[in-house]
Image (spheres, helix red, strand yellow):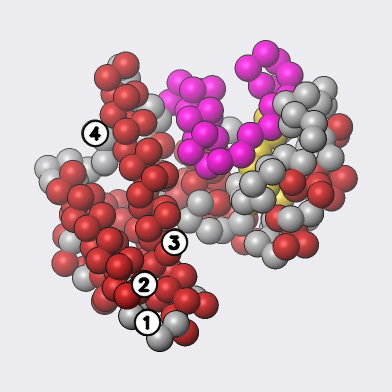
Amino acid sequence: MSNPQDYPTVADYPISQRWPARQPELIQLYSLGTPNGVKVSIALEELGLPYEAHRVTLADEDVKSTEFLSLNPNNKIPAIIDPNGPEGTPIGLFESGAILVYLAEKTGKLMGRTATDRIKVLQWLMFQMGGVGPMFGQLGFFFAYAGKEIEDPRPRERYINEAKRLLNVINQQLEGQEWIAGEYSIADIAIAPWLETIAKFYKAGEVTGLAEYKNVMAYIERFTDRPAVQRGWAVPPSLKS
């Protein structure tokens, strides 16, 4: 398989055969309006980086297509191609956390002001990538989606309890501050969409006691009030490409 960083232009990437770039000079986003997908569209909106978005559904015909796998062999959204990569040549990237770090470093924004700030932001970004995303995702599967048909209650109980534990961690971290690592950062862009998802998509607000975590609830409200967040949530689901 070719290295997705090896292609000299956006048009040379195999994914462009299925999702052609109308504006190849812009960052190309391949995504959908999931909590992982909107991390990148929100970041792009917050950073003011022009981009062209392509709707990639979770159906096998999209994420397991040869064209998509050529950019992300892990068959998950989101993924990007930046035609103006670090060496002035295109770079293709997958994994939402890696993309957030790349975009923040590209612009010098949303990663704090000091080296210490940067490490703290990365710490909370890893907390989302390794904890919040996987555990909340399993909560969704066993409470709201196909796994809810399983009669054994233990999987649901496990992930409901783990969601509560993680909510408590976030709630404590937010005591006395507006954002998870101090100033608004990519860590918030990673975490907050998953918090919204508990009630918005999983309808699991009651079983997780979401409303009891006052700092979390205020945090979600602050996050969703941001115009760039609202634009980022709206972009992928409305696209046709």
In the image, 59: left or right of 67? left
Above/below status of 238 relative to 229: below
Q: Earlier in the sequence, mark 3 or mark 2?
A: 3
Three-letter amino acid code of the residue under disc 4? Gly
Front position among marks 4 and 1: 1
Residue positioned 82% across, 22% down in the render: 8
Question: x%, y% of residue 39?
Answer: 49, 46
Residue positioned 39% across, 67% down in the render: 139
Few, some or many C-alpha atoms within 10 Å of disc 2 (few <14, some 14-19, many ≥20)? some
171 falls in the magenta region: no
What residue is disc 3 on? Answer: 137
Pointers 4 and 2 in contact (C-beta within 8 Å): no
What residue is disc 1 on? Answer: 152
Residue positioned 52% across, 77% down in the render: 146
Q: Secondary structure at mark 3?
A: helix
Q: CA distance from mark 4 to mark 1?
A: 41 Å
Pointers 1 and 2 in contact (C-beta within 8 Å): yes
Few, some or many C-alpha atoms within 10 Å of disc 1 (few <14, some 14-19, many ≥20)? few
Q: Which residues are magenta?
A: 84-109
Front position among marks 3 and 2: 2
Three-letter amino acid code of the residue under disc 3? Gly
In the image, 8: left or right of 140? right
Location of the N terminus by quadrant is top right
What residue is disc 2 on? Answer: 155
Residue positioned 33% across, 42% down in the render: 127
Front position among marks 4 and 3: 3
88 falls in the magenta region: yes
Front position among marks 4 and 2: 2
What residue is disc 4 on? Answer: 182
Q: Secondary structure at mark 4?
A: loop
